[in-house]
Image (cartoon, grey):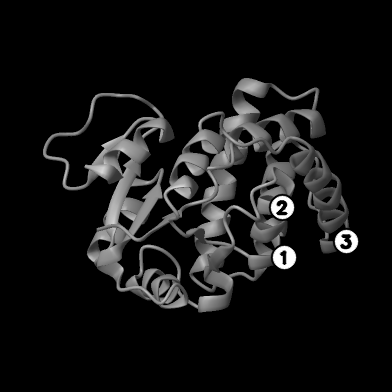
Amino acid sequence: MIAAVLFDLDGTLLDHDGAAGDAIVRAFPDADAAWLVPRWTDLGEAAVERYLAGELDFTGQRRARIRALARELGLGTWDAARADAWFDGYTALYEAAWRPYPDVAPALAALAARGLPLGVITNGDVRQQRSKLEGLGLAERLPHLTASSEIGHAKPAAEIFHAACAGLALEPGAVAYVGDRLDTDARGAAAAGLTGVWLDRTGAPAPDGPDVARITALDALPRLLAD
């Protein structure tokens, strides 16, 4: 029996890509959005991977992103002060664009009505991720937050999943974990002994031989966990 449900944050509860895309277009309105948005996404993913691997600190991964983009836009080489100042402005635009996916509130309400503890496991800085939950109005509904910056391990490492379960005083087998990344989230959780659920918002045909449960919207989650 599932006794608690934990979620990924970015791409699962928060429309991170939508907010980031909106913010970067506002920051560089003269650039080609069709190139700018996916390029910013790629730079962000690469920088975050280095941050999670311990190669860069939180500020360093931010600087790496905008310095690379500035060079590609022909804006020259930016020093740390200019990069930090730009990122402060970008962050304000990004935060103003934060929105939960429409299926989040109904799914959380249905699970909470069953008395299930709810929370988040996220790769990232705990202060920023907590700020996101507060900005989305989800902090009270998802009080159990486990972030890689505090644990010292990032998904898909079993340690971060086990730390979250320990915080709930539950064995991994009693906890479900839902995320939008097949390997990092769903398979990582399953390998750690949790019930891993892949939230595939693309709606594309499922890959052959799925080894974890797959849903295309959070509306399906309460029914899945009741079966």
Q: Position of residue 1 (x, y in %)?
A: 24, 58
User: Relative to the observer, which residue lies in front, 120 or 123?
Assistant: 120
Answer with left or right where residue 63 lies relative to residue 4: right
**Real-space Cα separation, disc 3 to disc 1, in angstroms:** 11 Å
Which three-letter amino acid code belongs to the residue tagged 2?
Glu
Q: Is residue 191 above or below residue 152?
A: above
**Residue that carries the numbered disc 2 in the rendered image:** 134
Q: Residues within 10 Å of mark 3 (few under 14, many from 20)?
A: few
User: Relative to the observer, which residue lies in front, 34 or 130?
Assistant: 130
User: Mark 3 or mark 2, which has the lower sequence index?
Assistant: 3
Dividing the picture into quadrants, the one containing residue 147 is bottom right
Whether tag 3 and tag 2 are in contact, CB under 8 A, the answer is no
Whether tag 1 and tag 2 are in contact, CB under 8 A, the answer is no
Q: Which mark is residue 80?
A: none
Between marks 3 and 1 in the image, the one whose residue lies nearer the viewer: 1
Which three-letter amino acid code belongs to the residue tagged 1?
Thr
Quadrant that contains the C terminus? top left
User: Mark 1 or mark 2, which has the lower sequence index?
Assistant: 1
Q: Position of residue 11 (x, y in %)?
A: 51, 41
Name the residue rendered at 74%, 28% in the picture. Answer: 25
Q: Is residue 126 above or below residue 221?
A: below
- Is residue 142 in sight in this rendering? yes
| Element under disc 2 | helix
Answer with left or right where residue 80 lies relative to residue 54: right
Q: Which mark is residue 81?
A: 3
**Real-space Cα separation, disc 1 to disc 2, in angstroms:** 22 Å
Between marks 1 and 2 in the image, the one whose residue lies nearer the viewer: 2
**Residue that carries the numbered disc 1 in the rendered image:** 59
Between marks 3 and 2 in the image, the one whose residue lies nearer the viewer: 2
Q: Is residue 157 above or below residue 48?
A: below
Which three-letter amino acid code belongs to the residue tagged 3?
Ala
